[in-house]
Amino acid sequence: MKSKLNIFFVSSEVFPFTQAGALGEVAGALPKYIKNFGHDIRMMMPNYKSINERKYVLRDVIRLQGLKIQVGDEIHAANAKSAFLPDSKVQIYFLDNKHFFQRDGLYADPRSGKQYKDNDERFIFFCKGCLETLKLLYWQPDIIHCSGWQTALIPILLKSVFREETFFKNTRTLLSFPAQFTSAHFESSTFEKAGIPPKFSPSSAQNKNGLNFLKVGLEYADLLSTYGESVVASIAELAQNRVEFKDILASRKSDIYGIGNGIDDQVWNPENDTLIPFQYSRRDPSGKIKNKMELLNRCGLVFSERIPVISLMAHSTNGSGLERLLALIDQLMPLDLYLLVFGSGDQKYHRQLKTLQKRYPEKMQVEPLLDTALTHLIVAGSDLFLMPSAYDVFGIEQLYSLAYGTIPIISNTASAETITPIHPETAAGTGFIFNHRESSDLLKAVKQAIKIYQKKEVWAKIVQNAMKVDASWDVSAQKYVKLYNKLVSLKNSR
């Protein structure tokens, strides 16, 4: 086991520079904790238009000027800038190219909602640019940790285009992927654009829809990780909804490791959270009800201490989760509750939710826009946090809710690491767990939560249980370091 590893962490989004979801949250936190264990970890992401270079003090790096990166038949110029992840000594590089990254959205046009047609070229450019940057830095990584489909071509590039380069001889790759198997399909010609020889074109990565970046990464990365042991245990079942991944996941079953996420307690801590109107703590939780009043006022609803606020993030649930919720809505709304839905999610479901809001204007609110400050207020001001989908893609939102004393209602396939079932008599437990196969079980869990909420002393103990849970990154970071060392010990498969 090496005492000090060189780790290159690559992500298409990193909080607080810019993010579209929980992928950026993980990338903005985990490397700081890896660094605390004494390893040299550096990062790279695209330099998007939305990044405030002055605020985060991005500086030009002389040796990283004038990069030349081939995508298809064209040579694209690039530069790289450097900064530090806030509140850390983790250095992060930003790949700069106006043609690919100076756009209003990260992956899609915010006006039309449509994915950029050249996303394949954008992230071929990024993946190649990461490897070329390392060569110019003369900094050889033991591990390249790839996060999400946008970085998933790096493993196959190392084993094909960069195969003969001794600089990467001892470099191993880890690909982290979400249980939702989020990816993008492109034409099969994308392999040619990346310069990957035909003999490396994996048949498992292609189907009638063309090329899937994530599937390429699942085949070629040395090891794989997803966000939680419960996800690994359920991986075959979850893949049934994405048949194209079934065979590759089965063939690599022994190479998949589940490591739960944590939260950055410098950002997510109700005791010192400057984004919420009223700070509070486990010792003095009185500020939570004041945040509830603020949240309801923000949503145009009348405050009642007796009625619990149940919130959910539409963006964090897959279609089946929202379908389940919509199917139950006329049974849920007669109950004593406020239902707040945040985030746009799929437009089809959003339109249905807005129609339901008009039907239940005094009990339901749908807010499509979601910024950082509002997210913090939702977590602090809600009594319950509902996740109707069969799984939580990253497992982070349930950790936020625990830290803020907001009790999760979550499926049995997404809760194993962090949530224990609540016992109504003893007030033991931290969340309400429903069987994801039974829609009626979700309704039953909500009814149970509302009933126990009325028992103020019992509820106060449950809130205390939640806020006692250690959701920091320390434990998870240690598991990643152990996995990195396992990677280093692997024989060279290139």
Image (cartoon, rainbow, N blue to C red):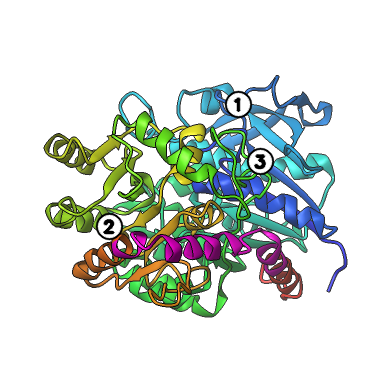
The answer to whether residue 469 is magenta is yes
The disc label shown at residue 321, or none: 2
Give the camera-side residue of 166 and 228. 228
Q: Give the camera-side residue of 430 and 201.
A: 430
Q: Is residue 282 left or right of residue 335?
A: right
Judged left or right of residue 226, residue 362 is: left
Q: Earlier in the sequence, mark 2 or mark 1?
A: 1
Residue sitting at x 66%, y 58% = 473
Q: Nearer the viewer, mark 2 or mark 1?
A: 2
Q: Position of residue 101 (x, y in %)?
A: 54, 28
SS label for mark 3: loop
Q: Which tag is nearer the camera, tag 1 or tag 3? A: 3
Residue furthest to the bottom:
254
- The quadrant in which residue 348 appears is top left
Residue 329 spot, x, y in % from top left = 16, 52
Quarter of the C terminus within the rendering = bottom right
Where does label 1 land, which residue? 51
Residue furthest to the right in view is: 3
Whether residue 42 can be seen here: yes
Mark 2 or mark 3, whichever is nearer to me:
3
Give, as a single range, the part of the protein colored magenta: 451-479
Indicate the secondary structure of the residue bearing disc 1: loop
Q: Is residue 175 magenta?
A: no
Please report contact status of discs 2 and 3: CB closer than 8 Å, yes or no: no
- Against 385, residue 127 (above or below) is above
Measured from the top left, where is residue 276 in percent x and y?
A: 54, 35
Q: Secondary structure at mark 2?
A: helix
Query: What kind of residue is marked 2?
Result: Gly
